[in-house]
């Protein structure tokens, strides 16, 4: 396996609720909202292990 993509589900839910709230209060939501996505692979796992 070369890697796994991990997404921040809590962040997605938080932003989704804020967008719904804004929409219900007459604000036009941004068309695109970028969320951070991380690739977990042997290289960055090894880097984290050396720090921790």
Image (cartoon, grey):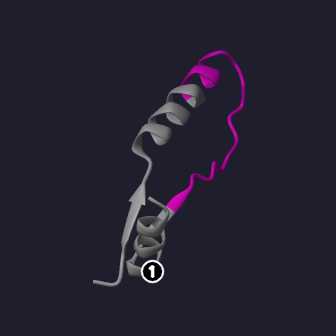
Q: Is residue 4 left or right of residue 15?
A: left
* Quarter containing the N terminus: bottom left
Q: Is residue 14 shown above or below 36? A: above
Magenta region, residue range:
20-37
x, y (%) of residue 19?
Answer: 59, 30
Query: Main structural element of the magenta stretch: helix, strand or loop?
Result: loop
Q: Residue at x 43, y 55 (%)?
A: 7
Res. 40 image quadrant: bottom left
Could you say which is closer to the camera, residue 27 or residue 47?
Answer: 47
Horizontal side of 12 relative to 19 (left or right) equals left
Q: Is residue 9 above or below residue 36?
A: above
Q: Residue at x 49, y 40 (%)?
A: 11
Picture quadrant where residue 22 is located = top right
Q: Nearer the viewer, residue 49 or 36?
A: 49
Which residue does the numbered mark 1 point to in the structure image? 43
User: Is 23 contained in the magenta span?
Assistant: yes
> In what element is the residue under mark 1?
helix
**Above or below, 49 relative to 22:** below
- Image coordinates for residue 37, horizontal then vertical, percent: 51, 60
């Amino acid at each position: 396996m070369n890697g796994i993509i991990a997404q921040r589900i809590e962040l997605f839910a938080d932003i989704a609720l804020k967008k719904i709230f804004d929409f219900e209060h007459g604000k036009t939501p941004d068309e695109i909202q970028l969320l951070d996505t991380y690739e977990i692979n042997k290289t960055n796992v090894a880097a984290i292990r050396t720090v921790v």
